[in-house]
Image (cartoon, rainbow, N blue to C red):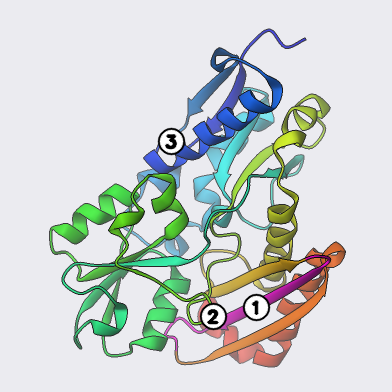
Amino acid sequence: MQTKPYRIGTRGSPLALAQAHETRDRLMAAHGLPEEMFEIVVLSTKGDRITDRALAAIGGKGLFTEEIEEQLHSGALDFAVHSSKDMPTALPEGLTLSTFLPRADPRDAFIGRTVKNLADLPAGAIVGSASLRRQALIRRLRPDIEVVIFRGSVQTRLQKLADGAVDGTFLAYAGLTRLGMQHVATEVLDPKEFIPAPAQGAICIEQRESDERISALLAPINDRDTYDAVACERGFLAALDGSCRTPIAGHALLDGDTIRFSGLILTPDGRQAHDIAVEGLRAEAQALGRAAGETLRGRAGPRFFEDWV
């Protein structure tokens, strides 16, 4: 019988803490455990500390997980809570993403300072985004506006926007919702036109593969629909690259035993793009996503990827 509190690793941003608290609350409800049986351990990651450069320039997505995963490996943490879209497709040996909470709205939100919609920005306006996918999509839709790197927590970016550093920015609508800030979104983008990042809106839990005790603890809160949809989207990522050096979009929808996937790859300037729409059996979700990625890689040809490295 567990007598010590379960130790939950997380980053320290308000959004990361909200996600860790949601995980704790779901586990409390599933097992009838009191709050004191869970300890939320906040860790600072390199990705949090370096905010003046693009992720691609300092190492990619793993910068948000390295310190946390070291603590998982050592046994100092029982499990860790992450935003699924921040997770590399290749995890350290011995670790796995075993559990996904029910997915929130995966769409992107535009927040305009003086206009409500991306389409209404005047030529020459400045939009800030930390995501290469969003940057490429913005350039594809609005080649007449300037796109700049814009990093930091949700609150930091919104304050920079209010201070006039940019005319607009993009954030995940799911993150705004989890913070009770969905009202700041001035436009929520159509996912058919502005395909979300793979796994956007999904909270995942990382654990040691061999830890059956934690596997049993987490199993009741795993949402199978989210698990399967994200498996498809991460399969697509894995076939392409899946780091922060690549403008990749992908979104899977479930319909009974069928899964439908839409994917898109772009050059960073948004001028060239290749898309794909496929469907298959839900039981083969990961393989379907991987096959879609391999198809796009072959269709685009090797020269398409020259700017990705």
What's the residue at 56%, 74% (across, down)?
Answer: 248
Q: Horizontal placement of 214 versus 10: left or right? A: right
Say which of marks 1 and 2 sits in front.
2
Q: Horizontal placement of 257 versus 132: left or right? A: right
Give how far across and how far down residue 41 sits, in percent: 50, 25
Q: Are marks 3 and 2 in contact (CB under 8 Å)?
A: no
Q: Are marks 1 and 2 in contact (CB under 8 Å)?
A: yes
Query: Is residue 103 placed above or below 31 in the rendered structure?
Result: below
Q: Amino acid at mark 1?
A: Ser
**Magenta span covers which residues?**
256-270
Give how far across and how far down residue 123 sits, in percent: 20, 88
- The quarter holding residue 146 reads bottom left
Say which of marks 3 and 2 sits in front.
2
Work out whether residue 285 or residue 188 is closer to the camera in this orientation and state it: 188
Q: Amino acid at mark 2?
A: Lys
Give how far across and how far down residue 81 sits, in percent: 58, 38
Q: Amino acid at mark 3?
A: Ser
Which dot marks residue 262? 1
The crowd level at tag 3 (other Cα within 10 Å; few <14, some 14-19, many 20+) is: some
What's the residue at 58%, 52% (across, down)?
Answer: 202
Work out whether residue 190 or residue 142 is closer to the camera in this orientation and state it: 190
- Which residue is the site of mark 2? 192
The crowd level at tag 1 (other Cα within 10 Å; few <14, some 14-19, many 20+) is: many
What's the residue at 70%, 37% (across, down)?
Answer: 221
- Which residue is the site of mark 3? 44
Among numbered discs 3 and 2, the one appearing first in the sequence: 3
Say which of marks 3 and 1 sits in front.
1
Secondary element at image label 3: loop
How far, Cα to Cα, is label 1 from label 2? 8 Å
How far, Cα to Cα, is label 3 from label 2? 35 Å
Does the magenta portion include 31?
Answer: no
Q: Is residue 77 visible?
A: no
